[in-house]
Each structure stands twice: as structure tokens, then as C-alpha cells.
Amino acid sequence: MTDYVIPSIATIRAEILTAWKNLEQDISTSRYSDAWIRAHADACALWGAYRYIKWAQAQAFPDTADSSHLEQYAALYGLVKTAATASASTSVRLTGTPGTVVASGLEMVHVDGTEFETSSGGTIAPGGTLNVTAISTTTGEIANKEAAETLSLTSPPAGVDATVTIMSSFQGGEDAETDAQLLARVLIRLRTPPAGGKATDYEQWALEVSGVAEAFVYPLRRGLGTCDVVPLTTATDRLPSAGLLTQVQTHVDAERPVTAYNTLVVAPDLVVTAVTATVWLEDGYEWAIVELLVEAAILAEFASLAPGDTLYLSQIETVISNITGVKDRTVSFPVANVVPTVSSVTIELVSPGVVTLTEGT
């Protein structure tokens, strides 16, 4: 589509003055004349109208529409922007006086301000500890915390210490769906409309669940009449939580054809792969900065892989070489391509392990 070019105020004013001159040849159109002032005022108003027309034109298409109009467009197809989700941990450790009975619902806060709440209670054991489950009351990726980090009780009850240790990481927190992500779903819906349960239908159903960033479908993986779905998140390992798997399974079961009863929503089996490389820099570049860029590029390469995709050693070498400031590189691990398996018993996903980078000298 040819871009709609808005004429300038000067151009519009000149066209108005030309029209007046054609109607009344003796009229003065010099700068700041009565006709010029009137034409300038009309040109300003018309220029605003032109801009509105261009804005309105953009709202007619989902890929150029503003956020509110994109959501309205998506709603025509039953698509709603997914909300941010909370994270959960199977275990955080309280400490205190043995025998103290601790109720659930204790409020905790991370040093960055993220808030959490215990979802179970119990009695502090003779050793002075009690492990309980917890969820975040703050939603989004910020609510994902690693094991060994600490939280603080906002109002510690008698007999309970203020410091709480995370024993199993908080996972499952996802940010609200962005306009770009919603647009991607709208475009999938437009390009591959529902067709009674084909593979793209299962992908769209999975993506409708809050917390799902990507979804991959494997028809007939376990034989005739089967269709399996692998949802992934934006976490580093991309694994969905057990709760998210249940949500997706429930939603897919509600949408799928009644005859397609053998449908499984499953998490992939991770093939954790470390990366070790030596990187030589061009003159004038700082290792601390380039190291961060290289690590981010390697992690982005892992994030681009679908379950079953091969991690090519040459591609790891390429993404390192493409970083500005890198003169040369040697990847010592992995030593070959990493080839995951997709079979009737497993769906493997290559996932990043420890990335170790050394500056070459």
C-alpha cells in the first residue's frame, strides 16, 4: 500500500490561495493579507483533518492499529490479550522457635519490592525450620526468583524469624501479552482460520492461555487419533509449570473436536547444553561489555529453537562472530551439533546450561 502523504500547511495554503485567485483575480494574496490569513487558518484546520484521516486509515488494519483498536480487532475473532500471571514455589523455609504454629497467608517481600504470600502453614520442627509453599502476589516475570534467594516477612508472627529462604525457585510468572504478541496471534488467525481441529488450531488454543509464549503441535506422535501440544514460556529454560500445563490441557480439551479425545499437553524434556568459548577482541573494546553481548546472543540462539530443533555448532560460532568487537572465537563445547529427539515417548528441547566465556590473549 502506497503511503498516504500529508501535504504541508504551506502547500494547502497555496492551493487555497490559488483557488481564490482563480475566482477573484484582483484579490490580494500577499503574506499577512486578509486572504492569506484566512487561507492559513483554513490550511491549519485541513492539515489536522488530513492527519486524522491517516490515523483512521491505520486503525483499519491490525498491523498498524493502536493498542485499543488492535484489541478491538482481535475481539472480533474471540481473541483477548492474556493477562500477567503470578509465580509459585513448592517450598520456602521459615525459621523460628520449635513448636510454633504458623498459619498460611504470611506476606513476604523481595528486596526489589516483589511481594509474595505463603499458601500453606504448619508447625516449626524441633530443628527450628518449617518448609511451606508460596505464591507471588505480584504478577509478571519479575516474580520469578531463584532458589537460595531470601524474602522478608512484612509482619513476622511471634516465634517466627523475619528472613525466609527460597528452597525451590518461583516459576510461572509471565508479563501481560504485548501488542506485538497479540498481533502475532491475530495474524495467525487471519492466515490460518479454524478448520475443525488442524494443527494450527491447537497452537492458537494453547496461545490463548495466559503465560504461554509459544506452542508447538505434534499430530499423530503417539499413533492414530493422537495430537500433542508443547507450550513454552519466556523463562530461561522455557519450561511451563505443572499448573500452566493443566490450564492449557483444560482449555484445549474445551476447544478441540469431541472425537479428538487423545490429546496431551506436555512439557518437553530438556537437553541442557553448556557453552564454553574463548573470544578475542578487536582493539578498543572492553571485555566486560562484549562478554555480556556474546552471552545474550548465545541465549537468544537457544531461545529460537523449537522442540526437536538441532543446535548447530556453526550457528553458535556465527552468533559470537556477529557481535561488534569480536575478532575471533573458538568454541570448545559443545564439540558437535546437539540433536534432540522427538518420538512417541519423548519430545526434547535443547536448553542452555552454563555459558563460560574467556577472553583470548
Image: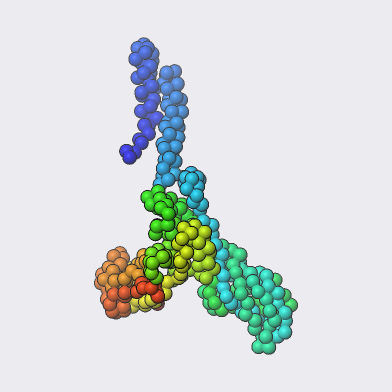
Q: Residue 238 in the image: x percent, y percent? A: 44, 68
Where residue 157 sits, quadrant-wise, is: bottom right
Specify whether residue 130 is in view: yes
Which residue: 31% across, 71% down? 310
In the image, 190: left or right of 173? left
Quick one: quadrant of the N terminus?
A: top left
Q: How is the image coloured?
A: rainbow
Where residue 46 sits, quadrant-wise, is: top left
Residue situated furthest right in the rendering: 158
Q: Residue 208 in the image: x percent, y percent? A: 49, 57
Quick one: quadrant of the C terminus?
A: bottom left
Which residue: 29% across, 71% down? 312
Number of on-image labels: 0
Instruction: In this rendered view, identify the residue nearer to me: 42 or 107.
Output: 107
Q: In this rendering, is residue 102 above or below 40?
A: below
Specify whether residue 164 is in view: no
Q: Residue 53 in the image: x percent, y percent? A: 43, 34
Which residue: 33% across, 78% down? 276
Q: Residue 115 in the image: x percent, y percent? A: 61, 66
Instruction: In this rendered view, identify the residue nearer to me: 87 or 109.
Output: 87
Which residue: 68% across, 83% down? 124
